[in-house]
Structures are given as C-alpha cells and as structure tokens.
Image (cartoon, coloured by chain):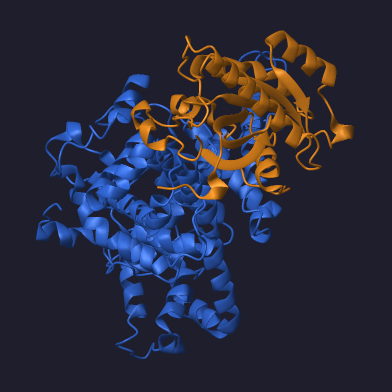
C-alpha cells in the first residue's frame, strides 16, 4: 500500500459545497463545466449575462459555418466562377456544402441509432436536428478531430439534462402561474434599464435586494414563501431579467446553444483543461502527452496502474490473460461510461465526475513518468470509477481463464449493479488515484505498453 | 483451474469483423452467437466481443469474435486488434455501393496489420433489402476471386447464410491449422496444435492457458 498524505486526501474529494443548483442539473453542469460562473457570489443576473454571451457566440458560429449555397448571404453576391455546384475549389460555398453533407451523413448514421431502447425524446426530429447541428458545427470547428463515433453519445445526455430542466420549468410555470406573473410586474420598473447601456452592476445589486427573501420588507411578495428551488427557477426564467429573453438560463429556445457550449467545454476541457474528452478520440499522441502514447491508451494504462496498486492479484490475472486495458477502456472512456449504464444512472455518474475540478495539480515534478489523466481531480476520479467497476466484477474475472470472456464481462456490465456502492468505492479510491503518479515509475507496466509506443 | 465441461474445446480461433459503419457487423455477430437480431442496434464504440462454441469438421471449436466499430479504421488499437486473429470477416452492405468500394481499403488495412496467412471472407450483407440492392452478386464474386477471398451473401435479419458463413471460415481456418501441424518441420507462429488454445495476448502468457482437457 502506498502512504497517502492527509492534505491530499482533503483536496481529493470533489467539492460538494458549490452544488448550488443541484436539482437543476443542466444549470449545475454548466457551472461544473466552466460555462457559468461557479462563484457562489455570482448573482442570477451574472449567470444570465454569461448565458446570453455564450449563446451569441454559438449563433455567430452557426451563421459562419453552416452554409447553404442555395441562399445567397446578404450583401455578398455569389461569384459564379467560384461558387457554382461544379466548382472544384474546395473553398467554394458549394465545396463546403458538399463536404458538410458528407459529414452530415456520417453523423446521421449514428444519430438514427441513438438510444433506440428509449425511443421518445432522442428520436424526435427536433432533438435529432439539434444534435446534428451541434455535432456538425463542433466538427467543422475542430477539423483536427472531425467526427468520431461516440461523440454523439457524449453530447446526447447534455442536451437531455437541459431538456429535463426546461420540462421542470414548464411544470413549475403551470403550478405557480401567479408567481411568474407577479414577478414580471414586480420587475416592470426596470424596463428602462434594459436598454443597451444598462448598468449591470447596479442592476444585479438591486436584484440581490429583491432576492433578499429573508429580510422581507414591503416587497415580500409571496414568491419568498415558496420553496427555494421554485424561487430559483422563477428567477432564472424571468423574461425581464438581464439580457431579456436571451438571458433566460432555462430556455427551450436556446437548448441547442447551451448544449453546444457544454459539449465544446467537455470536449476541449475548457476551464481547468486537464481532461479534454476530444483527446480520447484522437488517433495520435495529440498534445504529445508525457508518454508519447495515444491519449486514450495512456488513460487506459493509467487505470491499470491504479488497479495494480489497489488489487495487484486481479491486475496480474488480467495482464497474464492478455486483457489489455484499452480493449474495454476505449469505450468506457470515450463515452464516459455512457454504454455501461442506463441513462438515469449515467447522469448520477456524470454528476460526480463533473463535480470534480478539472485543473491540473502543479505539484508533480517528474513529468516524464506520469499519467496525465491522474493529474487532475476529474481525471483521477474517472480512473477511480473505472477501477471501482473492475473491482465490482472481481470474482467473475478471476474465475475465467479466457481473455475474450473477460472482455465480454467487462463490456456487459450487469445492469442490476448497486450504483451507490460503485460510486462510494470510487470516492474511496480517489485520493489514491491522485497519488498514483507518485508511486513507482508507472510507464513500465509491462511489455505490451512499450510495444504500443513503438507502434506509433 | 479445471475447465468446466461447457468450456471444453479442441481449438480456439480468433476472428475479427471489419467493414464500414452500418453494414451490419454487430447484427451478424449477434445472429451467429445468440441468434438475435436487433433492428435498432447502437453503433459499436471501440471493440465488442462474443464467443460461440460449435462443431467444425468433427472438432469442437470455440470461436471468439472481435467486432470493431466501422469507423475505427484509423484505430487507436489497430495492431493489438489483429494480433492472433486467424480469420477476418469483411462485411459490406449490398444496398450501399460505397461500402463495397471501401472493401479494398479494408483489405489494405488487413495486409498492413494482420498476419499474412489470415483467412479472409467477404460478406455482402442485407440481402433481405431486395428492392434496394445496389451491388451485384457477380461483381462481388469477381472481386473476391481476384483477391483470393471466399465470398457469401447474407441477411442477418432473415438469418440467411449467417451460420454457413461462419462455418465456412472456421472450416477453412481448421484446414489450414491442421495441415500446418502435420508439416512438423515448419512450426509457423500462428499454427495451433491440437489441445492448445490460441494466444490472444502477449506471447509470454500462453503457458498458462494450455488446454488441459484433451490428451
């Protein structure tokens, strides 16, 4: 066993205190993914302004990248020499149009097969359209990755939680119709302030005052007597707040915009930047991580490294059978366990993953021998959770002497699993995972790894 | 560790399933190993695995089949994926010409990464979609002959020729393996003597898996 220092133990646990919008998962995840401000002092209007800005960025991106050559853009008359359907110029509008169409076919191939067992929401044309546009735009924006199978399943749950929040909103709106109306009236005196040169600071202060439910003065509308969660929902959806409609944090109209920013953040690791999911789709040592390994292979090796610390006999058994970690971890990691659990359970897993900070610890000195994924609380938790899953199958894995059978078990995770237990185990391994880089030289775990390095 | 009776087998053959995305690889596999077909199956991410034990030429053969995502061509796990594979089933969709055109790219991938003696079978799947057929049987047949592949058309949905396809490739592998073990002066690395299992992982691990049930 490796000694764990106490200080690390404390930092290891994912912060629970900042879960301000825990019930509104779409809002909480936007905070966790670094899109909305995480500071507890950020006012609702701060959230609204940030929300509006990220939606503007998405709208601009969409205008810029989703070309339809049938509709000439305003102002610029198309140049018929370059912009005709037979043009060989790859930069012509039509050239881009055909390239996009090719990409779209690839994306659609997967989208039509998205959560077939659930039917319903994911197969509606509205949902499919949003998913398609988001994926297209992200891929056009990141040509170095392009579209890879699995990206769609990283995106879908993000859109889904936004959808659930909006459903919750309309439910609340129905039940508390009066309060929405009251609220609008209450804010009507701000109308002048909603002009362009609006003083945000002043406004948010006055908002704070309004929101001071405890010191109920003359303004103690009945809103203050409601459940705090309902209050929040009302405030997040107040059409008279900062940025008006564009700032409605819960908004049916802008789910696509919001899902894009979440997806982009998840993929590129915005914020702390430690775990960038896009790297798990990369076929080459993209950012040239410490080891020179393909990121997904390095991360797979990292979780075996952690396993070797936690349960060396199980680790040895798997190595001896030739069960290389990437055979199963490729899927686990690429869709962040999306294929291993039902959507409901997956959301709980992602709650925990996203709650972990995505910043690299600077403490590590000897970079060469480190697993990048273990350097951040989020990456370490992902590995800890994966190891918790392997441990859950311990006896059945030890009982088989056949690699393919082991892999079958690892990739057909039992659906009656006790998720709470699995998460608790992962949390208990979290500190160890963060420490794992410091225990022995990791990138020497067996000849199979060396071989990989040579292979690329 | 004593192997349970249902795990007894004379040979263990690894076969890989390749081909473009959406041609029906996973359904061919589920039809063969579980006699199931799912119209609304998800796309494969990475690799999936299945096994089935069956009789081939009077021997008990455990077929372990590795099914990859069609898009995994650039794959992060290429060489490991083909390691130890004795057979490859290359699937295209008879209703989608591009999937047939891409067959030669898949063949190149096989030649680059797999053992040169790997047995390759070309499968044109989805013959149930008769009105949508876009690749003629003769064209594929001709191509297969030219490239030295065995060829068959299947419908995983209607369970047409699926059993036959797997039986054919497994028999072919069996014939090659048994021929090899006869010519004892040429112990090729992939040859498997009776009673031994095929090594899936690194070479040094094989001693442990020597089959103990035959003699």
Between residues A33 and A86, which one lies in front from this camera angle?
A33
Between residues A347 and A411, which one lies in front from this camera angle?
A411
| Residue drawn 25% across the image and 46% down it | A308
Res A62 → quadrant: top right
| Residue drawn 72% across the image and 22% down it | B100
Tell me, yes or no, if residue A14 can be seen here: no
- Vertical position of residue A382 compared to residue B143: above or below: below
Between residues A63 and A101, which one lies in front from this camera angle?
A101
Q: Position of residue B172 (x, y in %)?
A: 66, 22
Left or right, residue A299 beside residue B130: left
| Residue drawn 70% across the image and 23% down it | B122
- Vertical position of residue A263 compared to residue B207: above or below: below
Q: Position of residue A205 (x, y in %)?
A: 30, 71
Q: Residue furthest right?
A: B131
State which chain is coloured orange: B
| Residue drawn 47% across the image and 14% down it | B188
Left or right, residue A166 beside residue A8: right
State which chain is coloured blue: A
Q: Position of residue B142 (x, y in %)?
A: 78, 12
Res B44 → quadrant: top right
């Amino acid at each position: 066993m490796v000694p764990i220092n106490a200080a690390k133990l404390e930092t290891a646990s994912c912060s629970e205190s900042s879960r301000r919008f825990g019930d509104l998962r779409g809002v909480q995840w936007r905070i966790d993914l670094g899109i909305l401000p995480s500071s507890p002092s950020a006012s609702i209007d701060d959230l609204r302004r940030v929300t509006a800005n990220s939606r503007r960025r998405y709208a601009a991106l969409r205008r810029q990248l989703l070309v339809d050559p049938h509709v000439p853009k305003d102002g610029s008359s198309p140049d018929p020499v370059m912009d005709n359907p037979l043009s060989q110029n790859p930069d012509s509008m039509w050239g881009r149009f055909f390239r996009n169409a090719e990409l779209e076919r690839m994306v659609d191939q997967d989208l039509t097969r998205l959560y077939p067992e659930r039917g319903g929401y994911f197969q509606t044309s509205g949902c499919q359209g949003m998913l398609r546009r988001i994926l297209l735009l992200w891929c056009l924006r990141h040509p170095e990755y392009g579209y890879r199978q699995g990206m769609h399943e990283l995106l879908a749950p993000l859109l889904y939680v936004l959808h659930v929040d909006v459903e919750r909103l309309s439910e609340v709106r129905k039940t508390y119709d009066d309060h929405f109306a009251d609220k609008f009236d209450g804010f009507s005196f701000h109308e002048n302030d909603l002009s362009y040169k609006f003083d945000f600071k002043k406004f948010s202060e006055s908002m704070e005052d309004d929101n001071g439910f405890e010191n109920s003065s003359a303004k103690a509308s009945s809103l203050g007597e409601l459940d705090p969660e309902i209050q929040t929902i009302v405030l997040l959806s107040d059409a008279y707040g900062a940025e008006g409609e564009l700032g409605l944090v819960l908004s049916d109209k802008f789910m696509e915009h919001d899902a894009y920013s979440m997806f982009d953040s998840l993929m590129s690791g915005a914020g702390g930047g430690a775990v960038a999911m896009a790297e798990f789709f990369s076929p080459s040592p993209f950012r040239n991580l410490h080891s020179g390994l393909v990121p997904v292979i390095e991360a797979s090796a990292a979780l075996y490294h952690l396993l070797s610390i936690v349960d060396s006999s199980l680790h040895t058994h798997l190595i001896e059978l030739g069960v290389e970690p990437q055979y199963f971890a490729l899927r686990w990691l690429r869709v962040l366990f999306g294929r291993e659990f039902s959507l409901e359970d997956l959301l709980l897993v992602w709650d925990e993953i996203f709650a972990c900070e995505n910043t690299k610890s600077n403490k590590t000195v000897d970079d060469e021998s480190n697993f990048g994924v273990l350097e951040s609380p989020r990456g370490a938790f992902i590995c800890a959770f994966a190891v918790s899953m392997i441990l859950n199958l311990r006896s059945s894995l030890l009982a088989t002497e056949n690699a393919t059978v082991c892999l079958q078990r690892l990739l057909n995770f039992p659906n009656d699993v006790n998720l709470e237990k699995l998460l608790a185990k992962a949390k208990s391994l979290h500190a160890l995972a963060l420490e794992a880089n410091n225990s022995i030289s990791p990138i020497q775990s067996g000849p199979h790894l060396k071989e990989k390095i040579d292979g690329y | 560790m004593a192997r349970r009776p249902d795990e007894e087998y004379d040979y263990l053959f690894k076969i890989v399933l390749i081909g473009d995305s959406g041609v029906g690889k996973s359904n061919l596999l589920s039809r063969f190993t579980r006699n199931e077909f799912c119209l609304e199956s998800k796309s494969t991410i990475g690799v999936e695995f299945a096994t089935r034990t069956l009789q081939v030429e009077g021997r008990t053969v455990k077929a372990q089949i590795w099914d990859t995502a069609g898009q995994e061509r650039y794959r992060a796990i290429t060489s490991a994926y083909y390691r130890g594979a004795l057979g490859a089933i290359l699937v295209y969709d008879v209703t989608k010409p591009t999937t047939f055109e891409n067959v030669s790219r898949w063949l190149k991938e096989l030649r680059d990464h797999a053992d040169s003696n790997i047995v390759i079978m070309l499968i044109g799947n989805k013959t149930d979609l008769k009105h949508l057929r876009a690749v003629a049987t003769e064209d594929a047949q001709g191509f297969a002959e030219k490239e030295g592949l065995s060829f068959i058309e299947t419908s995983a949905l209607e369970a047409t020729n699926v059993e036959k396809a797997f039986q054919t490739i497994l028999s072919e592998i069996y014939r090659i393996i048994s021929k090899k073990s006869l010519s004892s002066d040429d112990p090729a690395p992939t040859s498997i003597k009776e009673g031994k299992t095929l090594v899936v992982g690194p070479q040094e691990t094989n001693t442990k898996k020597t089959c103990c049930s035959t003699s």
